[in-house]
Amino acid sequence: MGTKSKKEIEFLCTDCGNTTPKWVGKCPFCGAWNTLKEHAVERVVDAGGSGRGLGGPVHRVVPLKEVATEDTRRLSTANSEFDRVLGGGLAPGSLVLIGGDPGIGKSTLVLTTLATMTAAGVKSLYVSGEESACQVKLRSERLNVSGSDMLLLCETSLEKVIRQAEEIKPQVLVIDSIQTMYKPDLPGTPGSASQLRECTLDLMVFAKNSGCITILIGHVTKDGQIAGPRILEHMVDTVVYFEGDRNHQYRLLRTIKNRFGATDEIGVFEMTGHGLESVENPSKVFLQEDAEPAPGSVVCCTLEGSRAMLFECQALVSQTGYAVPQRVAVGIDPKRLTIILALLEKFGGVAVGMSDVFVNIAGGMKVNDGSSDLALALAIASNHLGIPLRRQTVAIGELGLSGEVRSVSLLEQRLKEAKRLGMDEAIVPAVGKLPDSISGIRIVRVKTLSEAVSWLMDKK
């Protein structure tokens, strides 16, 4: 039987992006008031009106035990850091969303990756909705990939894009950006919630039915979320975010969602004149080598997925000039800083209540690992007391609200990374068992924050 179009009225929540068949004052999904807006949606149904036809074969109901698994061999991007973030490469038929601030390197990474994959024999199509063909060519010349056989299409109509993709049959399709795509039969301008949802849905159906790997580049709002609002994150298979300051050379690519791999991996890149290059040893990036010991600087080790990374905690304590002391945290949660300051006052004997306190994770890195608590506390106490720590000392431990130093996961892996980078002393929790295989590192065990501060004062 054939198909026909049917127009329906729905009410779309401008906050969460969900729809309801009728208007209500309060959104039943996110609880926001007066956020439902009426809009018309054209549904494609079969001639019998049995439902929405999204194209592709008709599937039958089968028991789970009878489902045959396929050999979904991943497609490598020839970029070790990008492959790490994706979980080993691009899965066939997957829909990947890459988000980040303007100018941080999203298009640069995708363009250079496609050029490398095309050189390896992968058929790829790059769809640019924001730049002309001449602009893309000029950017490719700056990146030294202008001689690539990668296919280019400058178009904003999604129907024309999918029609071209069905004819060309690429293995990888890139949409730059999804906010510029539109369907003329839908209300709203490109980038609106209804356009984003329907365009992404059509691309998802195309990717699943054809097996084409589809990569969407998405803009972010002022609060750092994918513009849309968060509609795209629920529909795609993988979501990765670019982090870092566009004015600095290093970038972090972090996995937020991944149906084909782990969600806690990160990739480290360096922005050069020829694009983004992988950083094989990120720990050296975030540590300042050959620097003199200074009060307020302590090295710590965190785990990002399967990777152990060393970074530098910096603290500055100064006399306040205001009625209320300032508390500024860069790279860590400000609430965590407040807790650490309270623990130092209560159990460490470090009186910083009437002082301005500034803490920073060097290199633009963001850390949410509780194992950095001890290093941050020692950095604050070190600067306040004027006692510098050796650059070869690493502190690892989580602080409890009763002043105890709690154990951390995979301590052996962290210490091995510290030893590899030249650390010879480690301040670790007294609880837990340390392996005997780690040699060359002097282990200092502390039970409480008070013991850690006393150890620091003995260095004076």
Image (cartoon, rainbow, N blue to C red):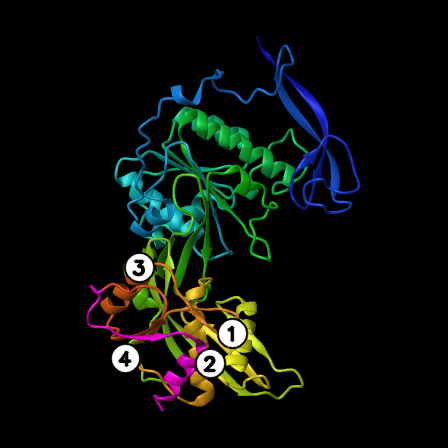
Q: For mark 1, does the 10 Å Cα neighbourhood hold few (<14), some (14 to 19), or many (20 or more) residues? A: many
Farthest residue toward the right?
A: 25
- Rendering coords of residue 50 (x, y %): 63, 14
Disc 2 element:
helix
Q: What element carries label 4?
A: loop
Q: Which one is earlier in the sequence, the residue at label 2 or at label 3? A: 3
Identify residue for label 1.
340
Residue 279, disc: 3
Rendered residue at 51%/56% (across/down): 101
x%, y% of residue 327? 57, 77
Over which residues does the magenta segment extend? Answer: 436-460
- Disc 3 versus disc 1: distance between alpha carbons? 32 Å
Marks 2 and 4, the one that precedes in the sequence: 4
Q: Does the magenta stretch include residue 110?
A: no
Q: Disc 2 versus disc 4: distance between alpha carbons? A: 22 Å
Give the Cα distance between marks 1 and 4. Answer: 29 Å
Outermost residue, bottom direction?
460
Q: Which amino acid does label 4 sit on?
A: Asp
Q: Dot 3, crowdedness within 10 Å: few (<14), some or many (≥20)?
A: some
Please give the residue where the numbered disc 2 appears in the rendered image.
380
Mark 2 burial class by Cα count in 10 Å: few <14, some 14-19, many 20+: many
Q: How far apart are marks 2 and 3 (CA)?
A: 30 Å
**Amino acid bearing label 1:** Ile
Give the mark toward the camera: 1 or 4.
Answer: 1
Q: Do the residues labelled 2 and 4 touch (CB within 8 Å)?
A: no
Q: In which quarter of the image is the N terminus?
A: top right
The relative height of residue 29 versus residue 361 in the rendered view (above or below) is: above
**Residue 384 in view, yes or no:** yes
Which of discs 2 and 1 lies nearer the camera? The answer is 1
Q: Where is residue 21? Give x, y as percent.
A: 73, 30
